Amino acid sequence: MRCMNIPFIIAVLVTAGVVDYAFADEASMRVSAGPSHFSYPPNCSKTAKPKDKPFCATGEVDLGLKWLVNIDIYLFDAFDPTKAVLFGFNATINKGIPEALEVRTGGCAAPVVDDLIPKFLPHFYEMVVTVCTSGGGPGKYDPKTQSFSAPFNISGDSALYINGTRSRFVFPFNGDGDSWVKPHFDVGLSAPITFSAGGPKVLEISLSYINTIATVNGSVLTWHLFNGMSFDIHSDIAGHHYYNRTFANKTIQLQPPQ
């Protein structure tokens, strides 16, 4: 069985204002004093799916006496754009030392549908990856490291659809994700999944899933965003198929308030 590495990496960057992200790998915007709301892509929300991306990152940063960071990432369903799966957290930091962390999760969505034989049988054989999140809540404090961590669950499956109908070839996966806030503004969330399933005679798939959100160089004003998916499939019917697409690979820089 050929092993497929599917990095599905999602990282959130903080955005506010109008920026041309299609052409800029790095974007800079001003944070006003007090809470500053942001979204990436611009103007997206939980109920407003972007036209050309399967996700939306939204939240706010408040650089007051205590620094508050609130980020939600929504992965939208390809069949029903009103459905989304949530990866989110709140972090409170006081003079570089974490004071609180809470993770928000919930929902299921199929963000990617891949047509396996588009030239000969378009949309007849499709691979659909569904992602769900659950758990989370308040983080656990470690006094030795002065850090908070909050585990959560990520689950779902890869399923073969035949002529629009979900087939018996369904490969479930699940694993543990984690969010953290550490001293010196080290904030992040990660949810890795790796699995291989099936058999060479019928259908086999290998998948690796990673969802990452993290500050850059210990700054809550600098975030990196990578959002993409790739996977490797082999079947006697469809042959060998490799999917690899990057939706975003950005660093976004927020400017401190004047």
Image (cartoon, rainbow, N blue to C red):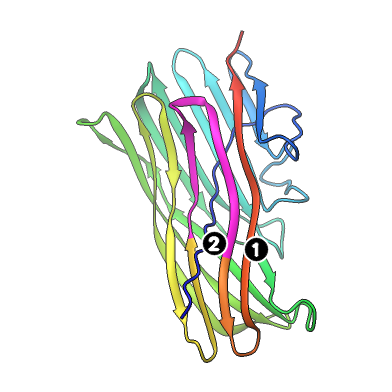
Q: Does residue 225 show up magenta in the picture? A: yes
Tell me the residue at 74%/82% (across/down).
124
CA–CA distance in space, label 2 to label 1: 10 Å
Q: Residues within 10 Å of mark 1 (few under 14, many from 20)?
A: many
> Which quadrant of the view contains residue 167?
bottom right
Residue 162 — which label? none
Q: Is residue 50 above or below residue 241?
A: above
- Callout 2 touching callout 1 (CB < 8 Å): no
Q: Secondary structure at mark 2?
A: strand
Amino acid type, mark 1: Val
Residue hosting label 1: 112
Q: Which x, y percent locates residue 58?
A: 62, 37
Q: Residues within 10 Å of mark 2 (few under 14, many from 20)?
A: many
For the record, the magenta segment spans 209-230
Disc tally is 2
Tell which circle, 2 or 1, labels the residue nearer the N-terminal end: 1
- The answer to whether 116 appears left or right of 211 in the picture is right
Where residue 127 sits: x, y (%)?
63, 74
The residue carrying mark 2 is 131
